[in-house]
Amino acid sequence: RDRTFPSGRTSREGHMVVGDESAVITLKLVDQQMELPDVEGTPLLIRNGLISMEEGHMKLVVDRWGKIISDIPEAEKESFNFTVNSARDMSATEYELVVLKEDGEEGESGAAPGGGRGRGGRGRGRGRRGLGRGRR
C-alpha cells in the first residue's frame, strides 16, 4: 500500500509473516524492505527488530537501527534448519492496555504508577530537577 504524507513524500508499506521454531509474527515492511523475497522458506536474518502495537496486535518492525538480511552465507544457513511453528501466531492475539490504580485494582485514571512521583514514590523524579528553586 502506498502512503502520501502532508509534505508530499510517499512511502510504500506491506506485511509479511515470518517465524521460527517458537512462533510466527507479522513483519511490517516499509519502502526498500518491500523488495525482500516473499517466498515461503526463504531464510531472513533480522537484527535489532522491535515490537510495535497496531490496533492491539503485535507487529515486528525493523527501523533505521535494525537490519534485515536475505543474502545469508551458506555457512550460516545451517542454523536455519528448523520447522516454523505456524500454530502460534503472535500477531493474531489482541492485547489490551490495563491501567492499575495504586492499590492494585484496575482503573481508568490514566495516572502514572506511584502518583507520578518518580522512582520509589519518593519525590518528583529526575525529570523536573531545578523546578521550584528559583534562580540563583
Image (cartoon, helix red, strand yellow):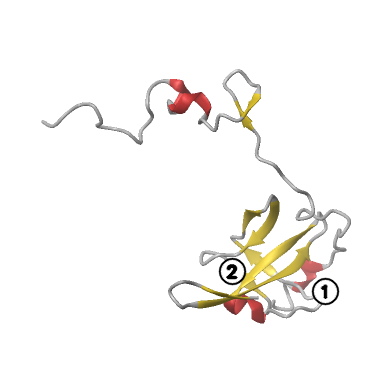
Dot 1 lies on which element? loop
* Residue lying at 43% horizontally and 28% vertically, measured from the top left: 118
Residue 41 image label? 1
Tag 2: amino acid: Lys
In the depicted structure, whether residue 131 falls above or below residue 39: above
Q: Quadrant of residue 85?
A: bottom right
Q: Which residue bears the numbered disc 2?
A: 67
In the depicted structure, whether residue 11 falls above or below residue 58: below
Question: Could you tell whether 9 is left or right of 108 in the image?
Answer: left
* Residue lying at 73% horizontally and 80% vertically, measured from the top left: 37
Q: Quadrant of residue 99?
A: top right
State which tag comes first along the sequence, 1 or 2.
Answer: 1
In the depicted structure, whether residue 48 falls above or below residue 131: below
* Residue lying at 55% horizontally and 65% vertically, measured from the top left: 63
Tag 1: amino acid: Gly
Foreground residue among 82 and 88: 88
Question: Could you tell whether 86 is left or right of 121 in the image?
Answer: right
* Residue lying at 55% horizontally and 76% vertically, measured from the top left: 11
Q: Which quarter shows the N terminus?
A: bottom right
Dot 2 lies on which element? strand
Foreground residue among 120 and 43: 120
Near mark 2 (Cα within 10 A), the count class, few <14, some 14-19 or many ≥20, is: some
Residue that extends furthest to the left in the rendered view of this protein:
136
